[in-house]
Image (cartoon, rainbow, N blue to C red):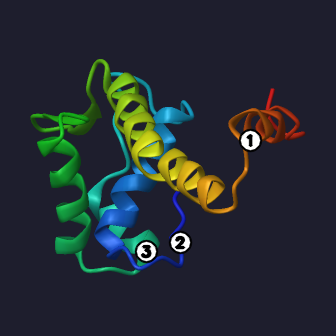
């Protein structure tokens, strides 16, 4: 289900990312209709133009496509595209930040790997 996060990102970006989350988690499958812009506007209490902007960005990215007279549907391969994009962002941002901070703290590579491998919630 869609939720708004308390981030600095504009609401239309948050909505777009939440729809991507739903695609990744299987809420929406390939060729299935996503939530309508009218429903988005009501759910978030935003202007319909804001809702449309979110969906338009998804369409521009090739994540959804317009099914004439029906609505917006999830594109074939959308889940894989989202995973690839987020994996790249994870490596470029989060992993780089962890490595940079570990170097500042003089944490050796083997110690960092050990710490990561010992994280309980990750198998």
Q: Secondary structure at mark 1?
A: helix
In terms of depth relative to the viewer, which is nearer, 47 or 108?
Answer: 108
As drawn, is 25 to the left or to the right of 18?
right
Image-quadrant location for residue 12: bottom left
Image-quadrant location for residue 115: top right
**Disc 2 versus disc 3: distance between alpha carbons?**
11 Å
Q: Badge 2, how many Cα within 10 Å: few under 14, some, many 20+?
A: few
Q: Secondary structure at mark 3?
A: helix
In terms of depth relative to the viewer, which is nearer, 90 or 113?
Answer: 113
**Which comes sooner in the sequence, label 3 or label 1?**
3
Q: Which residue is mark 2?
A: 5
Labelled disc at residue 112: 1
In terms of depth relative to the viewer, which is nearer, 81 or 57?
Answer: 81
The answer to whether residue 1 shows anywhere in this view is no
Residue 16 horizontal/vertical position (percent): 34, 56
Q: Which residue is mark 3?
A: 44
As drawn, is 13 to the left or to the right of 105?
left
């Amino acid at each position: 289900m869609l939720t708004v996060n308390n981030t600095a990102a504009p609401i239309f970006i948050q909505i777009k990312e939440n729809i991507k989350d739903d695609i990744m988690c299987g809420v929406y499958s390939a060729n299935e209709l996503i939530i309508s812009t009218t429903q988005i506007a009501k759910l978030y209490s935003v202007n319909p133009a804001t809702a449309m902007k979110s969906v338009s960005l998804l369409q521009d990215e090739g994540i959804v496509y317009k099914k004439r007279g029906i609505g917006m549907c999830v594109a074939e391969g959308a889940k894989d595209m989202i995973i690839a994009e987020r994996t790249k962002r994870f490596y470029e941002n989060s992993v780089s930040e962890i490595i940079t901070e570990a170097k500042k703290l003089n944490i050796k590579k083997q110690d960092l790997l050990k710490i990561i491998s010992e994280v309980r919630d990750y198998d």
